Amino acid sequence: MRLFKAILIALVVYTSAGSPSTMAAKDKLVIGITQFPATFHPNIDSMAAKSYILAMTARPFTVFDANWELICMLCTELPTLENGLAKKETTPGGKQGIAVTYSIQPKALWGDGVAVSTKDVLFTWKVGRHPKSSIGNMELYRSIYKVDVKDEKTFTFHFDKLTFDYNAINGFILIPAHIDEANFSNPETYKNRTAFDTDTLNKGLYFGPYKITEVAPGSHVVLDRNPTWYGKSPAFNRIVVRAIGNTAAMEANLVSGGLDMIAGELGLSIDQAISFEKRHKQKYNVIYKPGLVYEHIDLNLENPLLQDIRIRKALIYAIDRKAISERLFGGRQPVAHTSVNPLDWVFAENVPKYSYDPKKTAALLDEAGWSIKKRGVRTNAKGQKLTFEIMTTAGNRTRELVEQILQSQWKAVGFDIKIKNEPARVFFGQTMTERRYSGLGMYAWMSSPENVPRTTLHSEHIPTKANNFAGQNYTSFKNAEMDELLETIEIQLDKSKRKKMWKRLQHIYANELPVLPLYFRANAYILPKWLTGVKPTGHQYSTTLWVENWGVK
């Protein structure tokens, strides 16, 4: 209780001065986020900061909108079986596949005036399919076994299976062939040679409402209007995205006029936002949006200690997640039992749940042979300490406070937990991507509705040196039944049958605990009252995908 009281005091004590900037209409908007991208390549690594920025510079072919409906963005019409743009077919291997035809927006141009074309589609597919290219969502590219080009703007993807989301190619973000193809001559080194990182200011890399015109690593990114943008003209001539890892410093920058707004996707925590709203509601609108953001702790299952399911269960029984949710977040961020949010229609209610129970933790550790305590830390018969390292993004005050609570609760039952945090660009760019963490890694996944977690749970998606660290199964989880479910859910078109499979998937997840679920986050958007058009989605696709709809009162 003393620890909780201390944390609560820390959460509400701030110093603030000044007032938000009064910005000239259609001039400049300054946005605060908590992380700086590790790379600007759209398909390498998975990081919210990068997605937030690049959403203003490019468009996916398809995406889920704020109503959770699949829509076209770069394509002209969403292909369906009903409109004939999607057609079932038999693959060369004799299986059920599907051919899906898309047309690119006719006026879409890269920032240097070159047409966005099927040449870019072919090149992006080539990069995504290569086993050494370091692309994160390699399953999407692998499943497209052939591409037919009709003309400069029309193409057909041939998928090796018919999936329930056959027309959703949200993760297929184009790479300009005329700029980056030369850098792909050696696929193994492409990650370090791509123009997105070696020539980031090249206007030919972007075809959205904005283009990147300045990058100060670790500090800020400047985006200016893109004159070749084919859509609605955005209201602001310039947008500056500032990365401020310390959320208390971010709030101070907002009230002093250094920022105009704080992004909900990567901004203040709920507790900070509630406190901020009480003090500044006359000048700012605060929007709380619950959504498909899953805060959790990955466990490195190559650590011999964590391979023991009893230790994994002992860890979660020792955490009072309900108290963390209620006392830190006012109950706005519910406890998670699996990675599937109750807002998603495939959520299963009846899965194994782990309530706070230190006695069960003690019994599990005794059974596992960790019954000898020396200076409060459990050891085994060989004298080995029960010790782990936990890592997260440095400067994120809420995560760091949660870490302190976890460390204290685990210490009470005999775990020795050491905190080792890193800047977000290192933590996501290397530590998690290359599985350099030794024990526990705390962060969040953002997903779309009914998002099959193949890339994070399938055994074929474990990043290794051999595959140049492609894939996002950072835990090294291997389970044959889970692999089969991930493969069969995708191709089951009957929703009732699919929901049963989802229920089984969640049961395996909760039983095996490759991950310690914490809670589902709600995002807090801190917006000046003069800003209009920002519409939170509640899923992984950020508000900046619709930045051209933002305006000034």
Image: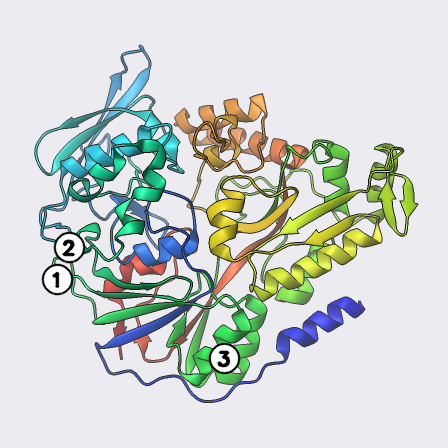
Q: Secondary structure at mark 3?
A: helix
Quick one: label 3 or label 2, which is nearer the N terminus?
2
The kind of residue tagged 2 is Gly
Quote the CA–CA distance across marks 3 and 2.
Answer: 36 Å
- The answer to whether the residue labelled 3 contacts the one labelled 1, judged by CB atoms less than 8 Å apart, is no
Image coordinates for residue 31, horizontal then vertical, percent: 37, 70
> Can residue 132 be seen in this snapshot?
yes
- The tag on residue 227 is 1
Q: Viewed as shown, does residue 547 lie left or right of 303?
A: left
The kind of residue tagged 3 is Ala
> Can residue 43 be seen in this snapshot?
no
Quick one: label 3 or label 1, which is nearer the N terminus?
1
Q: Viewed as shown, does residue 422 lie left or right of 549?
A: right
Image coordinates for residue 139, horizontal then vertical, percent: 38, 30
Characterize the local packing of mark 2: few (<14), some (14-19) or many (20 or more) Cα atoms within 10 angstroms: many
- The tag on residue 111 is 2
Q: Secondary structure at mark 2?
A: loop
Nearer to me, 261 or 414: 414
Image coordinates for residue 435, horizontal then vertical, percent: 55, 39
Q: Secondary structure at mark 1?
A: loop
Q: Considering only vertical position in the picture, is 90 above or below 190?
A: above
User: Looking at the figure, which quarter contains the N terminus?
Assistant: bottom right
